[in-house]
Amino acid sequence: MSDCRQTRGLVTRILDDRVTDADRAHATGCTACGPLLARAARFDDELRRSARTLVAEELPRGILDQPIGIGVGEGVVGRRSAPGLAAVLAAVAILLTGTFIALAPGTGPKPTPSPTVAATPLPSPAPTRTKPPFAERFRGTAAIVGQLSKLGYRCNDGSPLESVGTEPDALTREAAACTAPEAIGPFMLAVIVGEASNGKVVELHVKADILGPDSIDSRAAVAAEMARIFALVLVDEGAGQSGGSWATVHLVELEPGTDAEVVLRQVDFHASRLPTASYFVVIRGVAVS
């Protein structure tokens, strides 16, 4: 399509419904303005057809059949300055007037009463959930290290860890790492004491490796030592005893690649048997909601 200096002005006049005879004559031979004027005429036709489908009242004969314009050449439909778009606007105005009259009080058929629906109040904001207060489940690091040392464990200071959160029970450091004496049995065992930023013990890790065949007797020896550790580290003696009883039964049954877990008296015991046959137990307090 070639450029034409008159195209910009024609667009403005089309929008203002002020197309002149000179515009139509020019569009007859202009490859830029001719199609533009034709598209405008087709747009008017679409509006007219849409108005016919919307108007329910009978309109004066011919109000929607006003000619858009006269032919001004092949492929170009002329547009009269009136009543192209004006006819459509008149039809829409009549539609709106008829609708207003039909909906006015006291006119038209009485609507069937519908059941009254009570207004639903807006939901109030959910109350902020308060995190249960921190509860101490473990003895202090010094007490745990002292008890393990009496059993022949060798303990060293741990190292800081990247905190997993800002809660009071978020693990931040390994306070101590203790290894069992060689004479403990056919396995190696290590205990890691985990503290939160407030210095309280919040988690305990125990890892054990069986030396030699993975026999029932070796598994039972590991489970018995785990039970003894549980009784030493927990403040609640009942939780320690219950956890020890659970360990002596379920740790023996664990096969490599499986795990078991139980919560006893607000203490979570989670035991895993790694694919390498190592035992890995995590003990952590459970907050009371």
Image (cartoon, rainbow, N blue to C red):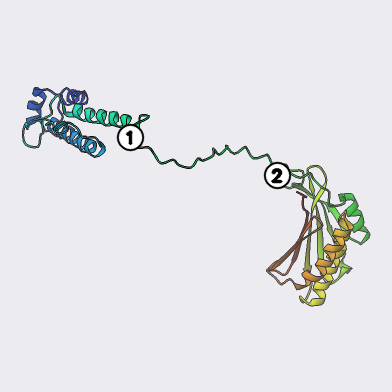
Q: Nearer the viewer, mark 2 or mark 1?
A: 1
Q: Which residue is mark 2?
A: 165
Q: Position of residue 87 (x, y in %)?
A: 19, 28
Q: Which residue is mark 1?
A: 108
The answer to which of 91 and 220 lies nearer the viewer is 91
Inter-mark Cα distance, 2 to 1: 68 Å
Q: Position of residue 94 (x, y in %)?
A: 25, 29
125 sits to left or right of 29: right
Quarter-wise, where is residue 128 in the image? top right
Q: Earlier in the sequence, mark 2 or mark 1?
A: 1
Give me the residue at 77% from left, 46% from top. 169
The answer to which of 134 and 289 lies nearer the viewer is 289
Q: Residues within 10 Å of mark 2 (few under 14, many from 20)?
A: few
Q: Is residue 194 above or below residue 206?
A: above
The secondary structure type at the circle numbered 1 is: loop
Q: Amino acid at mark 1?
A: Gly
Q: Is residue 47 above or below residue 160?
A: above
Q: Amino acid at mark 2?
A: Gly
Quarter-wise, where is residue 163 in the image? top right
Q: Is residue 125 above or below residue 189?
A: above
Q: Is residue 242 above or below residue 140?
A: below
